Each structure stands twice: as C-alpha cells, then as structure tokens.
Amino acid sequence: MKKTVLVAAAIAAISFSIVSCGAKDGAKDAATGSKADVSYAFGVAIGSSLKDTGVEIDYAKFVDGMKDVIEKDKPSITMEDAQMTIQAAIMQAMQAVAARNSEAEAAFLAENGKKAGVTTTASGLQYEVIKDGTGSKPTLADTVRVNYVGTFIDGKQFDSSAESEEPVVFPVAMVIPGWVEGIQLMPVGSKYKFYIPSMLAYGEQGSQGGIEPNKTLIFEVELLAIEPPAAE
C-alpha cells in the first residue's frame, strides 16, 4: 500500500467529497451547523485519513500545528519540511505493518498447510476443495463468471461479489497470481477456498482499499461458468 498522504491533500479531498455529497444528495447546508459541529466534522474527516496511514499522532502537537497555520500563519517548519516528515513517518509505519503481517503470514500458512484437505502447490498457494464440480477447467485465455468472498486471516471480510449484486466476470489472466493459478484448478461448478500468500497477491506494496503490505488473503470462490468467446 504505497501512501504519500499529506494533511493538505486530505483536507482537499475532504472538501471535494463534502461539496459533491451536498450537490448529489441535498446535504444539509454547512452554514446551519454550529461552530462546534463543523469543527468536529473536520476532525472526523481528517482523523479518518490519518488513521489510514498508521502513524501515531501526538494530539497536542497536531493542534499546535493547525493553530500556528490558522491563527498565526507562521508555523515553525516549512511546508516542504512538513511533507518530508509526514512521508518518512508513513514509510516507517508501513514497514512496521509489513513486518508484523509477514510474521503472521508465516505462522498462519505453516499451520494451515497441515490441516486435512488443504493442498499446498509449488508456488505456495494453498487451497481447499469445498465442492468439486464436473465441468471444464478454465485456461489462461478464458473469461470466467464467479461468486466470491474475500477475508483476511482474522476473518474480517474485505471484498465480496455480493456487493455488485450479481456474479463477477473477468479474464483469468487479469487478476492476482494466486487467483490466476487457483481458478485454473477448478472445474466449472466447483467451490474452492484459496489461501493466498502475499507474494501471490499484492506483495510488499499492498493495495489501495485496505490491503496492507504482506497481507495474506483468503477467498472462497464458486466457479459458475466459462464465458463464451466474444464474437469478432
């Protein structure tokens, strides 16, 4: 998860989001809110962005920094120095998360691979057959239709085809390596569970949308069909 989140950028995104929501949803005019309400709303929005970085915040110094800019227009460091400090802190936080996830992944996969019914391939992918279908197996050139649920090793769900309210269709070659390998093992009509090491998923960088560096992914996948080739 490569992040270069800056407070100024967060505020700009927050402002755009608020304006967009007001335009689309007829949101309450901010002028009708009290100073306390508006201040708290900014705190919630900025805090959400800061939380995603994983950086620990000294709240007193955070407030000091804002007051120096807003009230005095004279912070003790330049904006360039502020950006460099923030980026360094985010990188340090990411490295700590990556190390923690790597350790958890190694322990989980070592134990999971010993379980009855779990197969580990040469690449390190682990899978479990929940239901074995009788149809054809897709190839790298195929497009498939699937239902799936994605979770982390702690059971927290991060993705699901149910969010789109219908099965998902995608080319086999256009997904993460763990899916590319795993989906080709499945006859149509099957339901498998994939335990995907981070090196076969989003690796040391992670992915936007909440997948941290070195994060193990678990997918329960139902292969519904191989789509017919598109007419030329």
Image (cartoon, grey):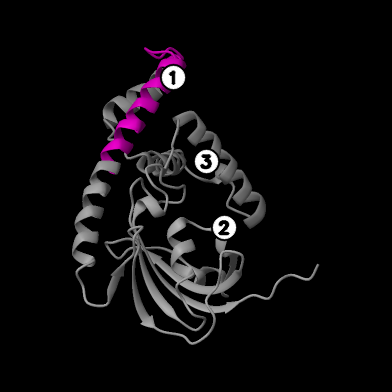
Identify the secondary structure beneath mark 3. helix
The disc label shown at residue 107, or none = none
Residue 206 location in percent, x, y?
A: 41, 46
Residue 102 location in percent, x, y?
A: 26, 47
The answer to whether residue 46 is above or below residue 62 is: below
Taking the image as shown, residue 129 lies to the left or right of residue 20, namely left
Q: Examine the image and state in which quarter residue 217 appears.
A: bottom left
Q: Residue furthest toward the right?
A: 232
Identify the secondary structure beneath mark 1. helix
Question: Which corner quadrant holds the N terminus?
Answer: top left
Residue 92 lies in the magenta-colored region: yes
Q: Which of marks 1 and 2 is nearer the N terminus?
A: 1
Residue shown at 45% from the left, 22% from the top: 70
Query: As rendered, which of 117 and 193 lies closer to the eye?
Result: 117
Residue identifier under label 2: 174
How many angstroms separate mark 3 from mark 1 (CA)? 18 Å
Dot 2: within a 10 Å radius of its alpha carbon, few (fewer than 14), some, or many (20 or more) residues? Answer: few
Q: Which amino acid does label 1 sit on?
A: Val
Residue identifier under label 1: 69
